[in-house]
Amino acid sequence: MNYLVTGGSGFIGSHLVEHLLKNGHSVINIDNYDDFYDYKIKIKNTLESVGANTAFPFQDKETDIQKVTKDTKTENYTLYYQDIRDKDGLTEIFKNHKIDLIIHLAALAGVRPSIERPLEYEAVNIRGTMNLWELCKEFGIKKFVCASSSSVYGNNEKIPFSETDNVDRPISPYAATKKSGEILGHVYHHLYDIDMIQLRFFTVYGPRQRPDLAIHKFTKLISENQEIPFYGDGSTARDYTYIDDIIDGVVKSIKYLENHGKTYEIVNLGESEVVTLNEMVSTIENTLGQKALKKNLPMQPGDVLKTNADIQKAPSLLGYDPTTNFQNGIKKFVEWFLGNRD
């Protein structure tokens, strides 16, 4: 099969690309190497995902991206340095490839930054996604897996969060863009028969996790005996989902769409295990064998108090089966982190 993966050089995307290639598929990766974090991390992700040498001689961003784009091109893998806001650029890619299914992971991420840059988030997460659907319409592509987010639930008072819950009250622009993507996705499914699964990811972590996310950031700061930013009283809680379980859910969503028509589904992908901020920090401390230095700070605008996935639908519909508990997941992450420090 020929898959197009947007954001295929990011955290989740690079793991998905690696899985698809190892299973004999062809992958077109579209990534714009956004400055949200160091492009060198994405280049390393890219090289690891295709099994290339990661001892890369970095020079400058444009030169490096051009080189890795050229050097990783194989019969089964093509990387495009491309922004999804640029429909003309996307059109040329669609002209050059027969695409069986799209897995759309690219987005401007982060709740707090979206409050500072809401219009940019709208342009990427809504308009960019619509560009892809417009091209699906034009080129007759009928299968689409889309990354949504648990943030759409806002401060939902009903626990655990179910796909049937009302999500009309997001509390950040990022969450609002993801909710918009779900609604607009249904429009394209209804009008143009694009079979679609929208996956609400719940706080994904593991090797290659973005450096701005709490588990990665805290692990780095604790290991360096630096203060960690500790928001609130430690009672906020997340349903942390290990990367291998997320990839299992994405791959099973792909297979479901390949075997079913007339499909539009919204599905939670979580671990269904709630971990408080206090518990998260203590687990990292115990795994590293170091105590955290906490800088106590007030709760931040846009942060939700708790996430907890009701995952009854994912196993029944897809056969999703998360197997990594938080303690084992943190152990695997810390082992990766310690082995990849500069």
Image (tube, helix red, strand yellow):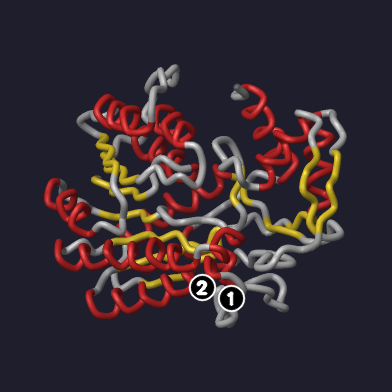
Q: Is residue 313 left or right of residue 131?
A: right
Disc 2: which residue: 176
| Amino acid at circle 1 | Pro
Mark 2 or mark 1: whose residue is earlier in sequence: 1
The span from disc 2 to disc 1 (Cα, nearest Å) is 6 Å
Q: Is residue 96 left or right of residue 179?
A: left
Q: Is residue 56 above or below residue 101?
A: above
Q: Quadrant of residue 326?
A: top right
Q: Quadrant of residue 198?
A: bottom left
Q: Is residue 218 left or right of residue 189?
A: right
| Amino acid at circle 2 | Ala
Q: Secondary structure at mark 1?
A: loop
At label 1, counting other C-alpha atoms closer than 10 Å, the crowd grade (few under 14, some 14-19, many 20 or more) is: many
Disc 1: which residue: 170
Name the spot of residue 322 as percent of width and height, x first.
60, 50
**Towards the viewer: 110 or 152:** 110
Q: What's the mark number on residue 144?
A: none
- Residues marked 2 and 1 touching at CB (< 8 Å): yes
The quadrant of the image that shows the N terminus is top left
